[in-house]
Image (tube, rainbow, N blue to C red):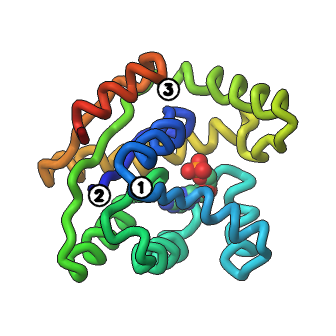
């Protein structure tokens, strides 16, 4: 199963991706996690990405496409993957289509999380508080100001992807405002 989860930050893609991984037995590929790991490891990619991520903008298409190209060569992706946070621009989607074509692979579904974007700022404040309460470090880009920049990046650069994938006939949607378990059920209906 090769699945893309599409939706703004805070829509619940990560939470659902973890559940899909368990059920489908394929890895979650989160470019955000990979970039944070690169920053923690102090790699050249990490050094390039840090300031951009801290202010809530998007890292360059070339960098992200490079990371994904390498990642889908790993043997654990042979049965598929759940993409969470990638692609985020039409250029990334086109680049990814080319990668899949070269490998003779096809996407099974692109699932868009439909959410009320005004409610997301509240969600992100809650996520930051919960993380803090668990004694874990809060993501620097999970503060309301940076979050607004991330939402704007979604609106202008990522939202056009729903039209892109609609045109390819693989776009499905779930209501991301429903409780977590209901979203999981809706996803089950789509991907089994
Ligand atoms: P996320 O964990 O998916 O919310 O991503 C956190 C940050 O990483 C984003 O705000 C971007 O700065 C960067 N990022 C993650 N994935 C991508 C991507 N596909 N394209 C560009 N930037 C990305």
**N-terminal-most mark, 3 or 1:** 1
| Crowding near the residue tagged with mark 2, few <14, some 14–19, many ≥20 C-alpha atoms within 10 Å | some
Q: Quadrant of residue 146?
A: top right
On screen, 170 above or below 180? below
On screen, 133 above or below 137? above
User: In the figure, is residue 106 to the left or right of 55?
Assistant: left
User: Does mark 1's beta carbon lie closer than 8 Å to ligand 1?
Assistant: no
One can see residue 160 in this view? yes
Report which residue position mark 1 lands on. 83
Give the residue displayed 66% in from the left and 38% down from the top. 147
Report which residue position mark 2 lands on. 2
Q: Position of residue 169 (x, y in %)?
A: 12, 48
Report which residue position mark 3 lands on. 117
- Asked whether disc 2 touches disc 3, contact meaning CB atoms under 8 Å apart, the reply is no
| Crowding near the residue tagged with mark 3, few <14, some 14–19, many ≥20 C-alpha atoms within 10 Å | some
Spatial separation of the CA atoms under disc 2 and disc 3: 27 Å
Spatial separation of the CA atoms under disc 2 and disc 1: 8 Å
């Amino acid at each position: 199963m090769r699945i893309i989860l599409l939706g703004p930050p805070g829509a619940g893609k990560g939470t659902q991706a973890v559940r899909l991984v368990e059920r489908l037995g394929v890895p979650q590929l989160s470019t955000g996690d990979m970039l944070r790991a690169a920053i923690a490891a102090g790699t050249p990619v990490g050094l390039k990405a840090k300031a951009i991520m801290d202010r809530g903008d998007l890292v360059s298409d070339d960098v992200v496409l490079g990371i994904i190209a390498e990642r889908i060569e790993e043997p654990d992706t042979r049965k598929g993957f759940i993409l969470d946070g990638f692609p985020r621009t039409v250029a990334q989607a086109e680049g990814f289509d080319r990668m899949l074509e070269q490998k003779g692979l096809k996407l099974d579904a692109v699932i868009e999380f439909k959410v009320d974007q005004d409610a997301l700022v509240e969600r992100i404040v809650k996520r930051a508080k919960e993380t803090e309460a668990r004694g874990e470090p809060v993501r620097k880009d999970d503060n309301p100001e940076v979050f607004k920049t991330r939402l704007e990046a979604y609106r202008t650069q990522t939202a056009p992807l729903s039209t892109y994938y609609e045109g390819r006939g693989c776009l499905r949607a779930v209501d991301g405002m429903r409780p977590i378990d209901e979203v999981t059920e809706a996803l089950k209906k789509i991907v089994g």
